[in-house]
Image (cartoon, rainbow, N blue to C red):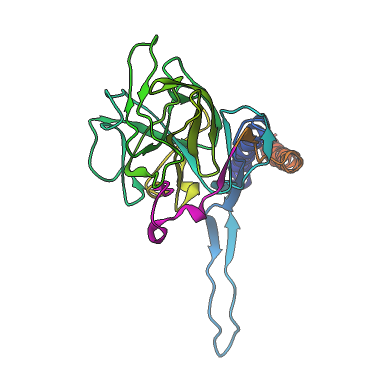
């Protein structure tokens, strides 16, 4: 059979995969926090028709002759640049302007926040003393959060939003859907307010703190949550956590705007919590959390349409190779007549 026939087939497969990537980008052009992907090609093994030879006293050197045998996918890379910010004016919408991911998870809650969550040892998530009620962790750039009837802070799919616990502000979780979680009051205006850096817990914004109703709440650029109470006091509720990775390209997409870590992404590095001493504070390398906004998809539609045209024409050209090879084989068969 003709080698060019198989080269054409490999070209069809590779360009079909590129069209799949482009189609997925276009489909997610309005997905919150979506990161566009691109695909690279590389040639396959070449058939050596003659080997190169070195020059001698009687004849000069001769280059080798090789014939390529097709193309294959070299890799699919993700563009992790920050997308544009879209204003929603919703108090539970958050965008990260720069480096960072929200930490979300699933798992049973313990009686309180002291034994529930993810251990954090020296800003390395998952390292440290194991907790009684661990949480299975994922990461996302989608900051569209909600509160359930118990006051738990959740993603749209019900994953718990993780963050730091304020020192002294224990959360008592409830398993009754008709009740609210209870939280110890800590004065946000008091001196020396800080968080517990040894773990991340499922965050909660209940209707009442102590004996007073929550009138409103706000989240600072560092994720620090405060609530204005009906008695005029301000309560510290926690701090939404952010993590980063040595190699974002190593993250594994799980669907639902979620990522999980892989051996090639590196361990998640947690942003330092409020009250961390300056010598150990790494928060300067993370982006700011912006309330009332969501990060839009970073898909460039003009680039995607261009890539689609190129991939389509390449697919058609490889199809033409197969058609031409078919005509050649037909002519060979007809030589017997």
The residue sitting at 51% across, 50% down in the picture is 286
Q: Which residues are magenta?
A: 269-290
The picture places residue 184, in percent across and down from the top left corner, at: 35, 28
Number of labels in the image equals 0
Left or right? Give the position of 180 relative to 144: left
State the residue lying farthest toward the bottom: 57
Left or right? Give the position of 274 relative to 76: left
Quadrant of the snapshot with the C terminus: top right
Question: Above or below — where is 44 with respect to 156?
Answer: below
Left or right? Give the position of 87 relative to 302: left
Quadrant of the snapshot with the N terminus: top right
Question: Above or below — where is 9 with respect to 65?
Answer: above
The picture places residue 67, in percent across and down from the top left corner, at: 60, 57
State the residue lying farthest toward the top: 178
The residue sitting at 65% across, 42% down in the picture is 83
Residue situated in front as seen by the camera: 226 or 243 = 226
Instruction: Verify whether residue 229 appears in magenta.
Output: no
The picture places residue 111, in percent across and down from the top left corner, at: 27, 23
The residue sitting at 51% across, 55% down in the picture is 284
Residue situated in front as seen by the camera: 310 or 210 = 210
The residue sitting at 49% across, 21% down in the picture is 147
Picture quadrant of residue 16:
top right
Instruction: Verify whether residue 289 appears in magenta.
Output: yes
Residue situated in front as seen by the camera: 228 or 58 = 228
Q: From where the camera sits, is residue 255 visible?
A: no
Q: From where the camera sits, is residue 131 visible?
A: yes
Picture quadrant of residue 135:
top left
Picture quadrant of residue 120:
top left
The picture places residue 215, in percent across and down from the top left corner, at: 53, 23
State the residue lying farthest toward the front: 231
Residue situated in front as seen by the camera: 134 or 12 = 134
């Amino acid at each position: 059979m003709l080698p060019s026939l198989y080269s054409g087939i490999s070209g069809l497969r590779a360009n079909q995969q590129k069209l799949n990537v482009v189609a997925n980008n276009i489909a997610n052009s309005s997905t919150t926090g979506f990161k566009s992907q691109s695909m690279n090609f590389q040639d396959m093994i070449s058939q050596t028709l003659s080997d190169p030879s070195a020059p001698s006293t009687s004849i000069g050197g001769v280059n080798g002759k090789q014939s390529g045998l097709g193309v294959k996918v070299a890799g699919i890379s993700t563009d992790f640049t920050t997308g544009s910010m879209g204003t929603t004016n919703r108090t539970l919408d958050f965008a990260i302007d720069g480096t960072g991911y929200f930490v979300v998870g699933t798992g049973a809650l313990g009686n309180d926040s002291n034994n529930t969550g993810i251990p954090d040892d020296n800003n390395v998530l998952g390292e440290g003393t194991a907790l009684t009620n661990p949480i299975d962790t994922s990461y996302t750039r989608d900051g569209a959060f909600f509160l359930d009837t118990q006051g738990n802070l959740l993603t749209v799919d019900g994953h718990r939003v993780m963050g730091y616990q304020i020192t002294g502000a224990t959360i008592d979780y409830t398993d009754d859907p008709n009740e609210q979680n209870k939280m110890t009051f800590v004065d946000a205006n008091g001196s020396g307010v800080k968080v517990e850096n040894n773990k991340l817990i499922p965050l909660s914004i209940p209707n009442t703190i102590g004996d007073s109703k929550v009138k409103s709440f706000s989240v600072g650029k560092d994720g620090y949550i405060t609530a204005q109470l009906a008695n005029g006091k301000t309560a510290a509720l926690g701090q939404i956590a952010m993590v980063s990775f040595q190699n974002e390209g190593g993250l594994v997409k799980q669907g639902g705007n979620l990522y999980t870590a892989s051996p090639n992404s590196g361990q998640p590095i947690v942003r330092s919590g409020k009250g961390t001493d300056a010598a150990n504070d790494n928060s300067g390398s993370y982006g700011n959390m912006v309330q009332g906004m969501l990060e839009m998809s970073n898909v460039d539609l003009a680039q995607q349409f261009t890539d689609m045209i190129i991939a389509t024409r390449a697919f058609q050209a490889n199809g033409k190779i197969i058609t031409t090879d078919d005509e050649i084989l037909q002519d060979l068969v007809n030589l017997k007549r």
